[in-house]
């Protein structure tokens, strides 16, 4: 039996623009998903989770069929790992996620990444992080139709990632203090990405420069993180939030949380992930409590989110 875990993430800069080849900056956070895998002698993959999703049992033969249920990421992850390893076996899979689902915190990527490592260990051939990251990205593309590697590589490698097509640079040891505010509204990344595509196709001369400006903000953000210029990082987050709003992915609740955090002294605040609900982040000083309280006053949950330097890992192997 093997237990693997992988972290969720927040996007600091560049969501949506990254779908069109711009860079993104994302940080792994200390909220993880745990996947336990045990090989069995049946010809079935049984998947269960600690939440209320229930148990499913799929014959290995049917694993490749497109699926729309809650476990579609895990099924695809198992299928592609089997294909990659050229081996297959019956499996019992148990999932426990401490990342709020459908909230922009990368819960799908985390379960995918942890499942790929756990299944590869159960097959006797643990995969390296580069392979896990690329298989997990493939899973997201297959399930969602389109996906950048942002979530999957951040969950795999941990730390802060500057993601560009074909290149990944990791910045560890950043002293950024983040607060995450959760609007409580679930939303679909796929739908939001699709909406941005539509508005981009409708008004190319207006939308293309906005996408490019988000790319420039991300590049500038990377420099300011290296310089640890918190004031400038906050300012850039605020600029990014304004442009995300113009892509149509912010909403009233997110703006309320963003303004509350800024009024409570955050250096900057923006939505994180696909938007349309989900979460926002605020860059704070050493004392996050004032900003947490301001978000909670709006009736939403908030938590301090230290950056996780550790990506996917084996928690235990018996
Ligand atoms: O909602 P999330 O956390 O899965 O983030 C989506 C980020 C997008 O840039 C909107 C899409 C992507 O694939 O990068």
Image: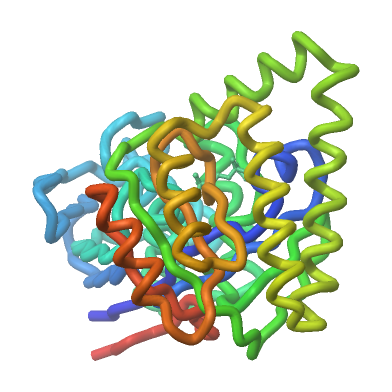
Residue at the top extreme of this rendering: 202
Vertical order, 304 against 294 (above or below): below
Residue 128, percent from left and from top: 60, 78
Q: How many marks?
A: 0
Task: Specify whether residue 300 is in view.
Answer: yes
Residue 288, percent from left and from top: 41, 77
Q: Residue at x 26, y 54 (%)?
A: 297
Vertical order, 288 against 99 (above or below): below
User: Is 245 or 52 nearer to us in this picture?
Assistant: 245
Vertical order, 270 against 255 (above or below): below
Q: Is residue 82 left or right of residue 100?
A: right
Residue 143, percent from left and from top: 48, 36
User: Is 259 or 40 nearer to us in this picture?
Assistant: 259
User: Is 229 or 2 nearer to us in this picture?
Assistant: 229
Q: Quadrant of ligand 1?
A: top right
Q: Is residue 237 left or right of residue 311?
A: right
Q: Report the colour scheme.
A: rainbow
Q: Quadrant of residue 68?
A: top left
- The quadrant the N terminus occupies is bottom left
Residue 26, percent from left and from top: 62, 63
- The quadrant the C terminus occupies is bottom left
Q: Residue at x 28, y 44 (%)?
A: 184
Q: Is residue 246 left or right of residue 78?
A: right
Q: Quadrant of residue 252?
A: top left
Q: Residue at x 53, y 28 (%)?
A: 192
Task: Specify whether residue 128 is in view.
Answer: no
Q: Residue at x 54, y 37 (%)?
A: 142
């Amino acid at each position: 039996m093997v237990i693997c875990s992988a972290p969720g993430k927040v996007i600091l800069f560049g969501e949506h623009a990254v779908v069109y080849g711009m860079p993104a900056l994302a940080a792994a956070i200390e909220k993880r998903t745990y996947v336990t895998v045990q090989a069995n002698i049946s010809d079935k993959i049984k998947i269960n989770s600690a939440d209320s999703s229930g148990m499913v049992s799929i014959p290995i033969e049917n694993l490749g069929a497109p699926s729309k249920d809650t476990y579609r990421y895990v099924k695809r992850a198992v299928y592609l790992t089997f294909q990659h390893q050229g081996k297959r076996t019956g499996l019992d899979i148990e999932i426990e996620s401490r990342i709020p689902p459908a909230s922009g915190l990368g819960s799908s990527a985390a379960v995918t990444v942890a499942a790929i490592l756990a299944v590869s260990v159960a097959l006797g051939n643990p995969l390296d992080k580069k392979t896990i990251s690329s298989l997990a990205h493939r899973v997201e593309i297959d399930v969602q139709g389109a996906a950048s590697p942002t979530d999957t590589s951040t969950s795999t490698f941990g730390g802060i990632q500057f993601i560009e097509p074909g290149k990944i640079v990791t910045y560890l040891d950043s002293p950024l203090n983040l607060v995450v505010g959760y609007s409580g509204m679930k939303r679909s990344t796929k739908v939001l990405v699709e909406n941005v595509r539509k508005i981009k196709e409708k008004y190319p001369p207006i939308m293309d420069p906005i996408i490019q400006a988000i790319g420039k903000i991300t590049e500038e953000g990377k420099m300011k993180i290296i310089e640890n210029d918190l004031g400038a990082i906050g300012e850039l987050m605020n600029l990014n939030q304004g442009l995300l709003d113009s892509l149509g992915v912010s909403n009233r609740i997110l703006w309320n949380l963003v303004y509350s955090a800024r009024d409570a002294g955050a250096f900057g605040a923006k939505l994180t992930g696909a938007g349309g609900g989900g979460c926002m982040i605020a860059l704070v000083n050493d004392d996050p409590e004032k900003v947490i309280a301001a978000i909670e006053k709006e009736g939403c949950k908030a938590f301090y989110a230290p950056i996780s330097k550790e990506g996917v890992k084996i928690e235990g192997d018996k």
